[in-house]
Image: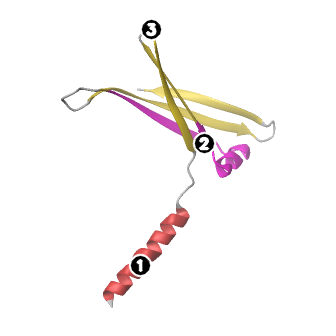
């Protein structure tokens, strides 16, 4: 009997968590190019309809990208070299219908 209640509770929690899970943005890339000892990485994302509507109504969104660089070794585990974070703040003025973004690079 107790087993039946536990299974029912697990199913209910699974359904609630699945319904409450946010939709994610589609991230494409990264594209990596090396020029003159400089590594250029570009990526992008498509926001879902809900996020676009919220930004248009004036709610600002912050998107954080984390970039880690590792040195690959043939026989040893990969070595962490450096990591940075890039924060993008997306804002919209609903009266003027002007969109702006602010980029902050952290170490």
Which callout, 2 or 3, points at the residue further toward the start of the chain?
3
Question: Given this view, does label 2 or label 3 mark the residue nearer the observer?
Answer: 3
* Direction left: furthest residue: 75
C-alpha separation, residue under disc 2 versus residue under disc 3: 35 Å
For disc 2, the neighbor class at 10 Å (few under 14, some 14 to 19, many from 20) is some
Residues at marks 1 and 3, CA–CA distance in whole angstroms: 59 Å
**Residue 75 or residue 88, whichever sits in front:** 75
Q: Which residue is mark 3?
A: 36
| Residue at 26% over, 30% down | 78
Q: Is residue 69 left or right of residue 34?
A: left
Name the residue rendered at 68%, 44% in the picture: 55
At 60% from the left and 29% from the top, the residue drawn is 102
Residue nearest the viewer, comparing 70 with 102 = 70
- 49 inside magenta stretch: yes
The residue indicated by pointer 2 is: 61
Measured as percent of width and height from the top left, residue 10 is found at 40, 75
| Dot 1 or dot 2, earlier in sequence | 1
Instruction: Report the span colored magenta.
Output: 45-70
SS at circle 2: strand
Report if residue 61 lies within the magenta region: yes
Kindly identify which residue carries mark 1.
Answer: 9
Q: Quadrant of the C terminus?
A: top left
């Amino acid at each position: 009997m107790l087993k039946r209640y536990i299974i029912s509770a697990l199913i209910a929690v699974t359904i609630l968590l699945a319904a409450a899970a946010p939709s994610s943005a589609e991230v494409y890339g990264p594209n990596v190019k090396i020029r003159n000892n400089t590594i250029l990485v570009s990526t992008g994302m498509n926001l879902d309809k809900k996020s676009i509507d919220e930004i248009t109504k004036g709610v600002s969104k912050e998107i954080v990208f984390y970039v880690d660089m590792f040195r690959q070794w043939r026989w040893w585990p990969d070595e962490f070299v450096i990591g940075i974070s890039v924060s993008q703040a997306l804002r919209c003025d609903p009266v003027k219908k002007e969109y702006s973004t602010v980029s902050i690079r952290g170490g």
